[in-house]
Amino acid sequence: MIIYGNVFYKGRIVECGIEVENGVVVDIGKDKRGKSVDGIIMPAGIDVHVHFRDFKESYKETIESGSLSALYGGVCLVVDQPNTNPPIVDEEIYFKRMEIAERSTYVDYSLNLGLVKDNVDEIDEILKKIEEKYYVPAIGEVFLKGKMSVSYETLEKAKKTVNKLITVHAEDPNEEDDVMAEVKAVERCLKMNRFHFCHISTAKALDMIYNSESTSEVTPHHLLYSKEVVKFKVNPSLKSNEERVALVRNFYKADILSSDHAPHTLEEKWEGAPGFPGVETLYPMFFYMAKKGYIKINDLVEKFVVNPAKIFGFDRYGEIEVGNYANFVVFDPHRERPIKAKDLHSKVGWTIYEGLMAVFPKDVYIRGEKVLEDGEILIDRGFGKVLQA
Ligand code: DOR
Ligand code: ZN
C-alpha cells in the first residue's frame, strides 16, 4: 500500500508517497505514487499520561471508552497510570489489567507499574516478572503527597533498586504554597537522581529540569488556563495567570506534552475530585494552534510524538520514518470547529475546553490500517495492541 499526499517528514511538510508493508513504513519518496490523501499526514500522537480507570471506577471511564476517545483525538499509543481502584502494585493485578486492555483497547496500550511503601522492597522482583511478558514504560506516576504517596526515602530506595525510568508527580507534602511545593519536590528529586517529571506547572521547576539530566512533561490545562479562569480542581493546581504565562514562555524547555486525562463525573467534580479529561482534545487543539502560528508544528511533533517514543523507549513508534509503524493522522486544516463535550467520547461528558477551536483528525491509521475515516470508526474494540516485552 502507498499513501500519497502532504506528509510531515523530517521536520517539513513535503508531497510524497509512504509505502507500507505489514504495518510498517518501508519506503518514502516523491516518486512513490499511490492513493492520494487530502489534508496533512502527520505522525499519530503518543499520550504518556492517561488515567483510564476501569475496575471499580468503570462508571467514570474504562480502557474501552478512554482508548476510543484517544483514537478520535489522533493518539495511537497511551501510557495508562496505576492509581486505579484497586491500584496496579503487583504482577497479579498488572496482568489482570492487561487482559482487560487486550480485549477492549482501540489504540495501542501500555501501563506503568505503581510504587507504594508496601511494595518497594519487592519492586524489582515484581517488575522482572511483568517484563517477562509485557513492555513496562516506567514506574510511576509516583506520588509524594496524598492517598498513594511515598516518602522521598522510599522513592530514593526504589531508584536504587530498579533500572527503570521513574515518573514523579512532584508536589512536596509539607509545603503549603502550590508553586513552592512543586519547586521543592523537583529540587529534592534532582539531587537524588534522574527522573521523568509529570505535568510540570511552574516555569521555575521546568527550568531546573531543563538544566539537568531529567525530563519533563507539561499539560494543555496548565498552559491554557489559570486558576482565575477554571475553578474545577486538578493536581498539580492551576496557577496564577502570571505563572501560566511564564510556563508558556518556557514551553520550549518541556520534553513532552501529555494530557493527564483524568476523568471524574460532574457530581464528583462539584465535590472537589481533581482532574480533567483531555486525551481526545490535545492533538486537535495544538494542531489548530500550529495552524494559526501560535506554536511551531515541529515543537508539537517533538513533544507529542518523538520525545514520548524516545524517553519511554517505544520501539518503532515516533515520527513518520522508514522502519517505524505506519501510525498516521490526517488533518484537514480547513475543518476547524469549536470543541463540544457532546462530540467527545470519554464517559464523563464534559470538558474544560468547551468552545475552544480545534482541528479533529479526518482519518487515522494504526499500523497501516485505516481505523478512523471521516469520524467513523472502522475497527472493533481490541484492535489496539498491548505492548509486549
Ligand atoms: O488531578 C489529578 N487527577 N492529578 C493526579 O495526579 C491524579 C489524577 C486522577 O487520577 O484523578
Ligand atoms: Zn499526576
Image: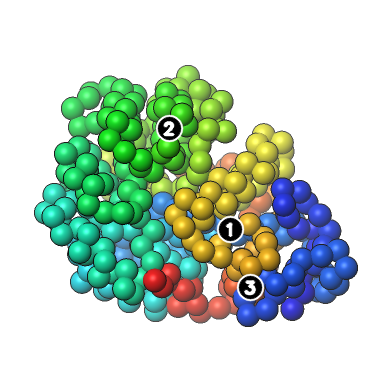
Split into 4 quadrants, where in the image is the N terminus?
bottom right
Residue 382 or residue 374, whichever sits in front: 382
Which residue position holds label 2?
212
Q: Which quarter of the picture shows residue 321?
A: bottom right
- Whether residue 285 is visible to the viewer of this picture, yes or no, is no
Q: Is residue 30 left or right of residue 214?
A: right
Q: Residue at x 33, y 74 (%)?
A: 133
Along the line of sight, the residue nearer the viewer: 206 or 278: 206
Asked which colour scheme the image uses, the reply is rainbow
- The residue tagged 1 is 318
Can residue 193 be seen here?
Answer: yes
Give the numbered dot on residue 253: none
The residue that appears at 45% across and 34% down in the rendered structure is 222
Q: Which mark is residue 24?
A: 3
C-alpha distance separating marks 2 and 3:
35 Å
In terms of sequence position, does the residue under pointer 3 or pointer 1 come before the other? 3
**Amino acid under label 2?**
Ser
